[in-house]
Structure formats: C-alpha cells, structure tokens
Image (spheres, rainbow, N blue to C red):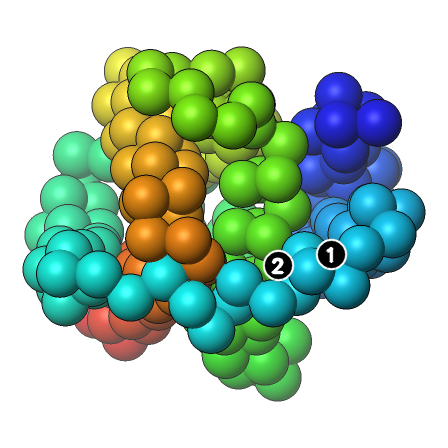
Amino acid sequence: MKLVAAWVPYAAVLLGMRGLGSAWAAILLYHAGIVLFLFLRKSSSVWKPIGRGYGPLLIPAVLLCALAAPAVYFMWPWLASPNMSLPAWLAEYGLTGYSWALLVPWFSVVHPVLEEMHWRGLAPENKKGFCGADFLFAGYHILVLYELVYWPWLFMVFAVLAGSSLFWRRTAERYGGFLLPVLSHAAADAGVMTGVYFLLRS
C-alpha cells in the first residue's frame, strides 16, 4: 500500500496537468489520494502528531525555508526555461485570476500539512540516510516543473527536495511529531508563492 501511495502524485500530475491541462485538477487529485490513504491506515493516531514536534531547529528551519522567496525571485533568470515563460506556463494550466489567488493560501497551508502526513508515513522508520520515499517525493516535482525550469537546474531542484525530505523525515522522528516539518515546509511553499508573485508583478 505504501508503494502505491508513493505514486499518487505522479498519477495526479499525469492525469490532471498532462491529461486535463489543469493544475487544480492535479492538486485536488493528489490531495484526495493522500486523504484516502490516510484513512486506509485506519488509525486516528496518524492525525495526532501534527501539533507535536517542537525542537530547537524550528525557527532556524522556518527562516531557512522562507529564503525560497528571494531564491526563486533572484535566481529565476537562470532557472527559467528558454522555451516557456512563467505567465504562459501558469495560464496553460489554468492558474490565472481567482484560480491563482486561491492557490496561494491552499499551497501554503493545506498542501504542506497533507504532504508531511503522507510522505513521512511512507518512509521506513529510523532510516538515517536517504530512502526511496525521499527520491519519489523529489521526483514528482520534476514531473511538474520540467517544462518550466531549464533542464540542467532540475538536478539541483531534485537534490534540494530530496535533502529537504530527508531533513523533514528525520526531524519528525527525532521530535516526535510533524510540527517542525509542517511549519518549515509551509514556509518554503509560501516562499515559492511569494517569489512567483513578485516575478509576475515585475
């Protein structure tokens, strides 16, 4: 079941974005799959660690992840694919107007909570190094971004995301909850949204 659950975002992206041409379809399919597998685990305890897991790394992790905003904004001239502009890519997948405005809070609040509960439950317990779940977490983002980001930079994106997954997994285990991973993940996602917002305005 864990292996099938790990492939949920890939199926959601292929069906929602590539099949239906809708980023929202992909997001909602992904999140519906997460909720389904959380309930299939048949344990109310899976929801309890969300408010636990405070540790001394919380504030540094949140601040570091928030740097995604200036990173996206200032590095975009190098990161951007020469074959696709950011506004055109967003429009292609229906992220304009109210659709884009709604995505910002959804991606910054709902998305990190569901992702952390999903992916941390797919990894083997007490695995100190990288595991398959870390690479699968990073990989589905590449499936989303390969048209938008110039291909040599996709290797860096993959490495950053796999490393982030490893960090979030280890801190969740060390501090006994998802609080640190969720808040720092939310800071990263909000940072990305902020960077994109200012890119669109400029």
Which residue appears at 41% of the width and 53% of the height?
176
Horizontal and vertical percent for residue 160? Answer: 27, 31
Place residue 166 in its image quadrant.
Answer: top left
Separation (CA) of disc 1 from disc 2? 7 Å
Instruction: Give above or below for 101 relative to 5.
Output: below
Earlier-in-chain disc, 1 versus 2:
1
Q: Which mark is residue 31?
A: 1
* Mark 1, other Cα within 10 Å: few <14 / some 14–19 / many ≥20: many
Position of the C terminus, as image quadrant, is bottom left
Which residue is disc 2 drawn over?
A: 114
Left or right of 108 in this view: 35? right
In depth, the one of 94 and 23 nearer the eye is 23
Apparent side of residue 192 relative to residue 71 in the rendered image (left or right): right
| x and y, in percent, of residue 144 in the image | 56, 36
Q: Nearer the viewer, residue 202 or 142?
A: 142
Quarter of the rendering containing residue 10: top right
Residue drawn at x 53%, y 63% as measured from the top left: 49
- Horizontal and vertical percent position of residue 155: 31, 17
Residue at disc 1, secondary structure: helix
In this view, 126 is above or below 37: above
Amino acid, disc 2: Leu
Res 117 label: none
